[in-house]
Image (cartoon, grey):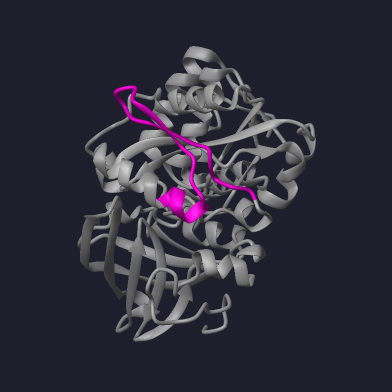
Amino acid sequence: MREITLDNLDDIARGAGILGTGGGGDPYIGKLLAREAIRAHGPVTVVGIDEVPADALVVPVSGMGAPTVLLERVPNGREELTALRALEKHLGQKATHLVPIEIGGVNSMLPIACAAQAGLPLVDGDAMGRAFPEAQMVLPGLIGVTNTPMALADDKGNTIVVDAVSNHAAERIARAVCVELGCQISCADTVLRGDQLAAGLVPATLTLAERLGAAVREARAAHEDPVAAATALLDGIRLLTGKVTDVSRRTEGGFARGRAVLEGTGDDTGRVLELGFQNEHLLATRDGVTVATTPDLICVLDGETGDPVTTEGLRYGLRVTVLAAPCDPRWTSEGGLALAGPRYFGYDTDYLPFGSAL
């Protein structure tokens, strides 16, 4: 992929919604913002990690907050650019490239809109390979990159620059600001040099999102199984096909937290799958046995269309398929699991190596 245009935006949004593991915000809203930015400013140039000069200043931009709030408080589309300009002013340098902090939902789309507005190239990669709920949960942290200075902006144009003693402290400070400003803000943070990208990013995830979205679309057009197409492309495993029978969800501390219960249908009749989530799906338990855990991907797809279902989109009666897919192997290191393993989120279980319980 050499550029993002109106023609491939739908596929990228659909694929990123699947990779977002239920979180990252509603990809449809982000797609609308990216579409308007491309219409106004033209296509976005995409560059591979190996094409970025070693001394480049690469800035991830994103939204922070509870995805449930995004449904009621739609961004104006300029927040990420406002955060970027505040960070550039603080650094005394201009960004040369932008990159998604996560390849998930709205947070894969907002960098596209910002890149179009700023006239900057977008790096084909991201810092997670999925979506995670907290600011320190990024691969650059494993190589010593700090997430501050972190510029925050709201929809009114207010900006704050956070300088913190640790990545975890920055998350706590930024989350408190986020809650105070209505549980929805935008961020520019975790600045990378070009020579840090190979170690700090998951490569070619924008391209993967486009391929994934296209695979679902093409399967539907051919009257084939779009969920099977997505599962195959991700080297994933189907956990259950069924319907949502219960959802417990609350907005707390700037996150959407909760659980969902699904009862199996067809070949899965009689089985029950429970999902635990904090913005993203983090734990899957089937018939009382844990079958998938963070940091591996747990994705919920509409059983008929293969479209991603976000945690805020889960509702009673929805017929879905839940699949699991392997994460970037760096997340299964000791440091990666300390950042984003199940025990960090309060679940009384260790990381379950992908596929080992199936």
Q: What residue is shown at x 66% (from left), y 48% (from top)?
A: 201
Q: Is residue 124 above or below residue 285?
A: above
> In front here: 237 or 63?
63
Q: What residue is shown at x 34% (from left), y 45% (from top)?
A: 65
**In which quadrant of the rendered view does residue 3 lie?**
top right
Coordinates of residue 249 in the picture (x, y in percent) = 22, 60
Q: What residue is shown at x 26% (from left), y 60% (from top)?
A: 318
Coordinates of residue 188 in the picture (x, y in percent) = 50, 34
Q: Is residue 326 visible?
A: no
Q: Is residue 211 above or below residue 320?
A: above
Q: Is residue 153 magenta?
A: yes
Q: What residue is shown at x 38% (from left), y 52% (from top)?
A: 172
> In front here: 39 or 203?
203
> In front here: 284 or 340?
340
- The magenta stretch is 145-171
Q: Is residue 237 visible?
A: yes
Q: How many numbered discs, if any?
A: 0
Q: Is residue 137 magenta?
A: no
Task: Please give left or right for residue 16 compared with residue 272 in the image.
Answer: right
Task: Please give left or right for residue 194 compared with residue 131 in the image.
Answer: right
Q: Is residue 61 above or below residue 288?
A: above
> In front here: 101 or 108?
101
